[in-house]
Image (cartoon, rainbow, N blue to C red):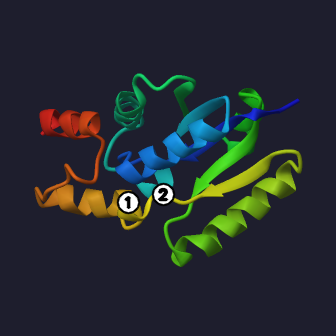
Amino acid sequence: MSNPKTALYPGTFDPITNGHFDIIERARNLFDEVVVAVAESKDKKPMFTLDERITMTQAAVDGIDSVRVVGFDNLTIELAHEHKAGVLIRGLRAVSDFEYELQLGYLNNSLDETIETVYLMPKLKHAFISSSIVRNLLKFNGKTEHLLPQAVQKIIVEKN
């Protein structure tokens, strides 16, 4: 049985951005526990390894009560069952996100009608931020400190 007070926020988080962090904070205000689930996502060919993405995500949420980070490589619905999460959190930045997220929400609902999907929008100042934009900047040593949580920026700088 799932617990609607536990929310699962799945994503690739390659890397986790201020937009993702904003969604985590908003979800934390709505639910008793937020499980941030970092997907393996081999099909997306991430810039950072799963372990690196987990480490960055843990660093970003360090000190936030009732938020924990896990890695996964199975179906999101299966992971929700494992963590007894009754809600999936998805972020929406723009209309361009909506169609994909709607299809994903319907798919997840077809797999388990008891788990709800809740869509949250980041604050407007974070709405343009995406991991792909950050990765492109990183490839060219562009400025990213205004796009990433400070702890994540530090990890990336130390890695390079």
Q: Amino acid at mark 1?
A: His
Q: Which residue is mark 2?
A: 122
Q: Judging from the image, what secondary structure is the residue with disc 2 in?
A: loop
Classify residue 67 by image quadrant: top right
Q: Which residue is mark 1?
A: 126
Residue found at x 65% / y 40%: 30
The percent position of residue 145, horizontal first and vertical second, equals 19, 49
Residue 69: image x %, image y %?
51, 29
Q: Considering depth in this image, is 31 or 145 the residue closer to the camera?
A: 31
Label 1: state its secondary structure. helix
Residue at 81%, 45% (x, y): give it.
115
x then y, percent, for residue 143? 14, 56
Q: Is residue 82 left or right of residue 73?
A: right
Residue 50, horizontal then vertical, whole percent: 42, 36
Task: Name the amino acid type tagged 2.
Answer: Pro
In this rendered view, identify the residue nearer to me: 123 or 2. 123
* Quadrant in the rendering for residue 128: bottom left
